[in-house]
Amino acid sequence: METTPKGLLIIKHEFFHAISNDDCIKALPETWEKLDRQFITVAPKSLRLNELYDAPQVQIALTQRKYFTEVIEPKLREYPEYKILYFGFAPIPLAIDLGQQFHNFRNIEIFQWHHVHKVWYQNIDHEPNQNFDLQTVNVPDQKQKGLNNLLIRLSVSHRVKTGDTQEILENAAEIDILLTEPDEDAISTKDKMLQIGEEFKRVLDKIADNESALEVVHLFASIPTGLAFFIGTKISPNIHPYVQTYQYSTTEKVKYAKSVLIKGIIEDTIKITEEERAIALQLRTLSQNELETNVKSFLKSNVTDSRGRAWYLGIMPDLADGIMADRFWKDLPPISTSSLLDDSFDFKQTAINDGFYWKNNKWFVDDSFFIALHNRLQNEDKIKKAIRLFIFHEALHYEKHRLTTANSTDIGSFPKVLETADYQADAYGIMNEFGYSSKVSEIGNIKTFFLDSIDVATETMWSFDDRGSNLEEIQIRRLNRYLIWYWQYVRIEKEGKTLDSIIQILEEKPVIEINGLKTKELNNRFYYDLNRKNAAHFEIALFKDNLVSRHGSSSPIPIESLIDGIKKMNGDLIKEVLRGLRDSQ
């Protein structure tokens, strides 16, 4: 006998109609009526049925995913012993996508809307057909190779017509999961819902085991909203392929339009408000003033300070002999020889592909960078420091590395080259920031200065990734760049006693990587999918002091928390894991 839950989390998924709390309560079993109830309404956008075909469902799904992360998931963690109830009036693709967000949660009950009796139910006496016969046809054999495309027609409410799907996807392997007598109210009991959901999962399992290694399955579904949500909960992020959904319209010539890719990455198109444009203009002006007044004053003094000696002695004259002696560092120019003395920020062009570029002594920077910087730092002094670190870094790229708009096209296709150039420019920027700050005022605690500078530098890096929601994928080289700098942070935190010891840490570029995430290639750039594993366990490896060390995820080194930190762009989470790695050496 099922035990009574401690409480209820009631999810109301509203697109076509509002769902009243009272109607939900009326559908509850008698034993649940007095339980504590928490209602959560998911209503990203009101839609009419005749608008679905052309509706921006992909962007609506992104809004849903953000809402799940920011509102629903914290509630699920807060009330782990509460039963989750779903009531939905939603498009099929969006119901499936929301359901997939719940894949880790199994204490779920689905309530359906009955089209005849106009009530919410799980079990109802009304049987539209005497014969509930579920059939599955044409599942490929596990050893069948050479499959390039595969579609599933899931026919429960109505029959999905073969001709309509073949018009979209020709020469595809075709699987039918169908009721022999489909009807909008065919699912009259919980058991029938469970039967269809488990059969759908069984078919996905078979596809995942197929030797053709299909990446995407195309799903054409005529099903109730509740079943759509339920099958979404059955789609595993690590085992099953992506599921491409489609929106149907009876009035369109081509009946199906591509909709949400379940588990897929959704690019967030940022819409900048007038208030945000004002913030971006304010920070663009701040950056120009900082460059023109303070940075150029430092550059002029650096001309004298660096004359006749290595660039690093121009900013750190008391550095001990032998530090930075390798040509990799010694061969760099003083910051005063860069173009910065003649540079300025452009105020006309505010939307820039790839975030920024430099040309003819002008810095062209996208508004979204300034907005993200404002949101992440929220402190004028830190923002000024971020701007200095940014232009000191890029100045080395342009001056020494000769990495300009003329030769930087597709430079991301060379991740190891760029990783090394970026590390050198990052360290160069931080050390020149030390030189700048020591000119402005006496630096009290040197260790604190460098830790704060690394924090600001990494927050500046995140500003190019931060699009207002958790990351779902990241370029491998960018993830490695974060690992490198958070590793340097925790090393300096423990070992950085003096300026000499800190610079000795910085002059050694770390070699650190993780393993266990699924990778993909796009336009000759390689990404980690932060939601999919390609191995049973996560590992982290480090090359230090001529030794290779490998560590699996464990209580002192919980690599899952590190990945969570990457998703959330949260440096504190990442540093905490790397402290465990540091202390294990």
Image (cartoon, helix red, strand yellow):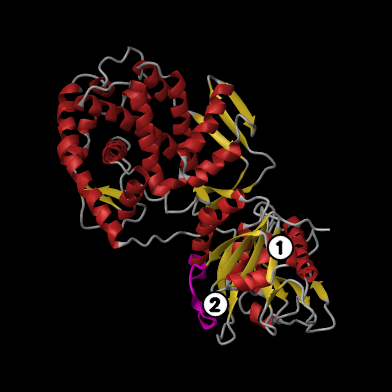
Who is closer to the viewer here, 393 or 443?
443
Q: Which residue is identified by label 2?
A: 16
Magenta-tinted stretch: 43-59
85 with respect to 201 (left or right): left
Who is closer to the viewer here, 9 or 357?
9
Q: Marks 2 and 1: in contact by CB < 8 Å?
A: no
Query: Residue at the spot x=21%, y=52% of the render?
Result: 346
Quadrant location of residue 389? top left
Numbered marks: total = 2
Look at label 1 and name its amino acid.
Trp
Q: Which residue is identified by label 1?
A: 32
Task: Point out residue 537 in the picture as x, y percentages from the top left corner.
Answer: 67, 39
Task: Point out residue 445 in the picture as x, y percentages from the top left corner.
Answer: 32, 21
Against 55, residue 234 (above or below) is: above
Q: Residues within 10 Å of mark 2 (few under 14, many from 20)?
A: some
Quadrant assignment for the C terminus: top right
From the image, state whether disc 1 or disc 2 is nearer to you. 1
Q: Is residue 136 visible?
A: yes
Task: Point out residue 117 in the picture as x, y percentages from the top left corner.
Answer: 70, 83
Quadrant location of residue 401? top left
Who is closer to the viewer here, 459 or 23?
23
